[in-house]
């Protein structure tokens, strides 16, 4: 949404003048922590470490009060920063409209707010509270994050991935669908511009191009896209582009042979026509394209496969690790209307 440093500066300024709930956006070991309010609303059932939630929330091109992971509490006054005046009051009523380039607007806001700050506030108490809430929330999710089940639990795959890459030197993105909801609450970014998110949702398959673009821009980083089997169905052929153009990304496919996120939405067509079913051997596809492809079915193979995949990318070969997962539908979300 915003360049993270800019957004953090703005958050700190807003917190200091009491416009948002506190210094929740402050850096803790270089990580982006959730705003205190978000953590409060989240705990113990949900948290969204990648999302900052000021009381008055500047949003970008389209005012989006509800996201897949975070919901802006009802009645929250919204400051809408947008390039297009027609977007004001289109989706949500804006308390204040700011028309202009997002970066310039945030710069101007930061400057104005900085002038109002008499002295820095001690963020210690808020940081401790967030750490406590976060620990409780992680404990609640631990069974899934460490699950030994087969088919694999996608949360286990993501936890193992995060524990086995150099997070600071990794640029990661995900697709729409459950992979977004499974990765975004748990992935903790440690450096600016290392997590590519895109707001509420986007077209399936977009993550592959994002990872390829990131790799072209930052060849020194490990660039990962995490996607589902519906997502690869849209743009999977471009894995061949990655091979042909020597763009060595690491592609993490969570294959549950289903559009799991749609199961609750499409019960009749699932029952009558199996409309949510998907099939395919994508590791084989990756190999057929000249890349590295490996199918992983057991928990003990997750970490070795990740290591093999990373080694391939270091040798200039795009790698696709296809994890066969269960149709997990549990997600960590902030309850709406809080
Ligand atoms: C082009 C496009 N079509 C449809 C959608 C709506 N949509 C979002 S997620 C999803 C299914 C995702 O399935 P999968 O990638 O297999 O993830 P899962 O939920 O199974 O883990 C659909 C159809 C979309 N975002 N983009
Ligand atoms: Mg799927």
Image (spheres, rainbow, N blue to C red):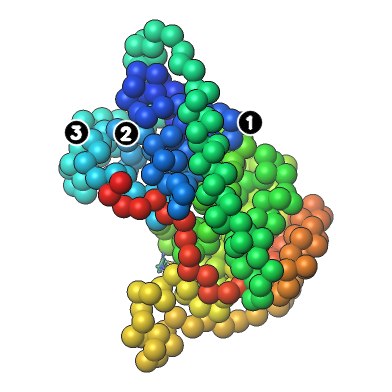
Which of the numbered marks, if any, corresponds to residue 71?
Answer: none
The disc at residue 95 is 3
The residue that mark 2 highlights is: 55
**Ligand 1 contact, mark 1 (Cβ < 8 Å):** no
Residue 113 image point, x, y percent: 35, 17
Disc 1: which residue: 29
**Depth check: 143 or 194 in front?**
143
Seen at 69% across and 66% down, the residue is: 320
Residue found at the far top of this picture: 118
> What's the residue at 57%, 44% (across, down)?
135
State whether residue 279 appears in this view: yes
Total numbered labels placed on residues in the image:
3
Sequence-wise first label, 2 or 3: 2
Q: Secondary structure at mark 2?
A: loop
The percent coordinates of residue 328 (x first, y second) are 52, 70
- Asked if residue 142 lies left or right of residue 302, the reply is left
Pointer 3 local density, CA inside 10 Å: few below 14, some 14–19, many at least 20: few
Q: Earlier in the sequence, mark 1 or mark 2?
A: 1
Is the CB of mark 2 within 8 Å of ligand 1?
no
State ligand 1's quadrant.
bottom left
Query: Badge 1 local density, few (<14 within 10 Å), some, or many (20+)?
Result: few
Q: Nearer the viewer, mark 2 or mark 3?
A: 2
Q: Earlier in the sequence, mark 3 or mark 1?
A: 1
Badge 3 element: loop
Mark 3 beta carbon near ligand 1 (under 8 Å): no
Question: In the figure, residue 243 lies in which quadrant?
Answer: bottom right
x, y percentage for residue 138?
Answer: 57, 50
At horizontal 55% and vertical 79% (from top left) the residue drawn is 257
């Amino acid at each position: 949404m915003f360049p993270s440093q800019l957004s953090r500066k703005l958050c700190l300024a807003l917190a200091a003048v009491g416009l948002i709930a506190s210094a929740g956006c402050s850096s803790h070991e270089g990580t982006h922590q959730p705003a205190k309010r978000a953590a409060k609303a989240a705990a113990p059932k949900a948290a969204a470490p990648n999302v900052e939630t000021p009381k008055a929330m500047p949003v970008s091109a389209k005012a989006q009060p509800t996201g897949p992971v975070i919901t802006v509490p009802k009645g929250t006054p919204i400051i809408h920063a947008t390039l297009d005046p027609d977007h004001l009051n289109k989706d949500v009523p804006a308390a204040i409209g700011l028309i202009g380039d997002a970066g310039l607007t945030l710069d101007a806001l930061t400057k104005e707010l900085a002038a109002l700050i008499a002295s820095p506030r001690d963020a210690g108490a808020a940081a401790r509270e967030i750490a406590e809430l976060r620990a409780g929330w992680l404990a609640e999710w631990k069974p899934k994050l460490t699950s030994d089940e087969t088919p694999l639990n996608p949360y286990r795959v993501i936890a193992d991935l995060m524990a086995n890459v150099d997070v600071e030197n990794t640029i990661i993105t995900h697709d729409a669908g459950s992979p977004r909801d499974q990765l975004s609450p748990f992935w903790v970014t440690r450096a600016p511009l290392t997590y590519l998110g895109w707001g509420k949702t986007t077209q399936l398959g977009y993550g592959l191009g994002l990872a390829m673009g990131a790799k072209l821009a930052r060849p020194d980083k490990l660039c990962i896209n995490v996607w589902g089997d519906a997502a690869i169905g849209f743009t999977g052929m471009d894995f061949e582009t990655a091979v042909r153009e020597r763009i060595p990304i690491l592609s993490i496919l969570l294959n549950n042979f289903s559009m799991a996120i749609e199961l609750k939405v499409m019960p009749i067509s699932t029952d009558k026509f199996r409309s949510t079913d998907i099939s395919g051997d994508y590791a084989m596809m990756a190999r057929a394209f000249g890349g590295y492809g490996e199918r992983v079915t057991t928990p003990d193979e997750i970490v070795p496969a990740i290591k093999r995949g990373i080694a391939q990318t270091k040798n200039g070969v795009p790698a696709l690790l296809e994890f066969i997962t269960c149709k997990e539908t549990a997600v960590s979300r902030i309850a709406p209307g809080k």
